[in-house]
Image (spheres, grey):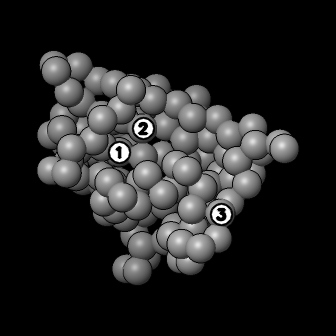
Amino acid sequence: MLNSSGTTTIFLHTGGIDMRKGFQGLSAVVREQFESDPTDGSLFIFINLRRDRMKLLHFADGGFWLYYRLLEAGTFEPLKATDGSTKLRIDATELAMLLSGVSLASSSQRRKRFVA
């Protein structure tokens, strides 16, 4: 289970990403588009164009962790950086809200997650 401490830096890739990418492909995106080091302990989040799949890349304990989430129904909320870049820094609370379907724009709205 992913356990993000309050000191973990979390970055979200705001554009759609090819979900066929694995450790090396996502690490290359971090290096090239984020201009960051994928082994610095930060958590990097990638969402596909349809916004129904998410991958989280994290380096910890001497190796990479890759988490994958596929929604049965609904989509992840589209987020944009204010400066127009593909890199958006979020905190652990915003990540939890994104994963649970709570809209970051309006925390009273809840996005669909499964067929009821």
Choose mark 3 or mark 2, whichever is in front: 3
Tell me how far mark 2 sits from mark 1, CA to CA.
Answer: 6 Å
Badge 2: few (under 14), some or many (20 or more) residues near its Cα, within 10 Å? some
Decide which of tag 3 and tag 2 comes sooner along the chain.
2
Badge 1: few (under 14), some or many (20 or more) residues near its Cα, within 10 Å? many
* Rendered location of residue 59, percent (x, y): 24, 30
Question: Residue placed farthest to the top in the image?
Answer: 62
The answer to whether 39 is drawn above or below residue 77 in the figure is: above
Q: List the residue tagged with mark 1.
A: 44
Question: Residue placed farthest to the bottom in the image?
Answer: 82
Q: List the residue tagged with mark 2.
A: 56
* Rendered location of residue 106, percent (x, y): 56, 77
Q: Nearer the viewer, residue 104 or 87?
A: 104
Tell me how far mark 1 sits from mark 3, CA to CA.
Answer: 24 Å
Query: Can residue 87 be seen from the camera position used here?
Result: no
The answer to whether 52 is drawn above or below residue 98 in the figure is: above
* Residue at image point 68% right, 60% down: 111
Question: Which quarter of the figure has residue 102?
Answer: bottom right
Q: Are marks 2 and 1 in contact (CB under 8 Å)?
A: yes
Question: Which quarter of the figure has residue 87?
Answer: bottom left
Q: List the residue tagged with mark 3.
A: 110
Local SS, label 3: loop
Question: Residue placed farthest to the right in the image?
Answer: 116
Q: Nearer the viewer, residue 40 or 74?
A: 74
Q: Amino acid at mark 1?
A: Phe
Q: Quadrant of the N terminus?
A: top left
* Rendered location of residue 68, percent (x, y): 52, 31
Q: Quadrant of the C terminus?
A: top right
Q: Amino acid at mark 2?
A: Leu
Decide which of tag 2 and tag 1 comes sooner along the chain.
1
Q: Amino acid at mark 3?
A: Arg
Local SS, label 1: strand
